[in-house]
Image (spheres, rainbow, N blue to C red):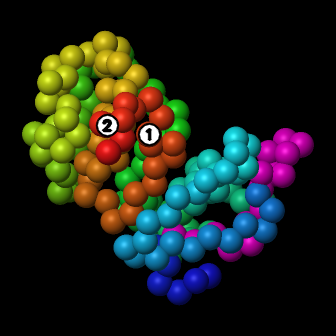
Amino acid sequence: MTRNAVAALEKVSKRLGDSQALNSFDLSIGEGELLALLGPNGAGKTTALNILLGLRRPDSGAVSLFGLDPRNRRARRFIGVTPQNIGMPGQLRVLEVVELIRAHYSNPLSASELFEKFDLAGVASRQIGGLSSGQLRRLAVALAFVGRPRAMFLDEPTTGLDVEARR
């Protein structure tokens, strides 16, 4: 494993059904680095991310997150994640969802700070089911920042966002 890597995959392989999603894939992300995985659909980007986050096990190879097995809860305490597909209860209000997520962290961002940074103050009292796809995506990205993460993992973070929100 790469020393001092925040996250690393070393010679990771993963088969999904008949498809070889990853084949001896290496990746190392150091502190302060920004990395974008680009490629066509089916290239293994989401599979690599899911393995790195401990959501899937590799068939072979080594994985570490902050030097630990990513399935270890301690390894995941300091990450923020926005998955490719999101689902939230449509009856809950935006503020309720934010407060629910905030309750899981010892030093979360305040709801007002989050709403300001992600331009969500105008929808705080609205039900999730009444948000546009862009507002819902912006909320999902904002929730990844609630716990003041040391590492962020965003899968297709700009899907559904308008040009201003992408900035």
> In percent of the image, x 31 and y 37: which residue is there?
165
Q: Is residue 38 visible?
A: yes
Amino acid, disc 1: Thr
Contact flag, marks 2 and 1 (Cβ < 8 Å): yes
**Does residue 5 belong to the magenta stretch?**
no
Q: Assess whether residue 8 is covered by the magenta stretch.
A: yes
Q: Which mark is residue 88?
A: none
- Farthest bottom residue? 3
Estimate the x, y position of residue 64 in percent, counting from the top left: 56, 71
Which element is circle 2 on? helix
Identify the residue at image location x=18%, y=44%. Answer: 117
Q: What residue did someone put label 1 on?
A: 158
Q: Residues within 10 Å of mark 1 (few under 14, many from 20)?
A: some
Could you give the CA–CA distance between mark 2 and mark 1, rounded to whole angstroms? Answer: 8 Å
Q: How many marks?
A: 2
Which residue in the structure is indicated by mark 2?
Answer: 165
Residue drawn where x is 29% and y is 42% of the image: 142
Instruction: Determine whether, in the image, residue 155 is placed left or right of residue 110.
Output: right
Magenta region: which residues?
7-21
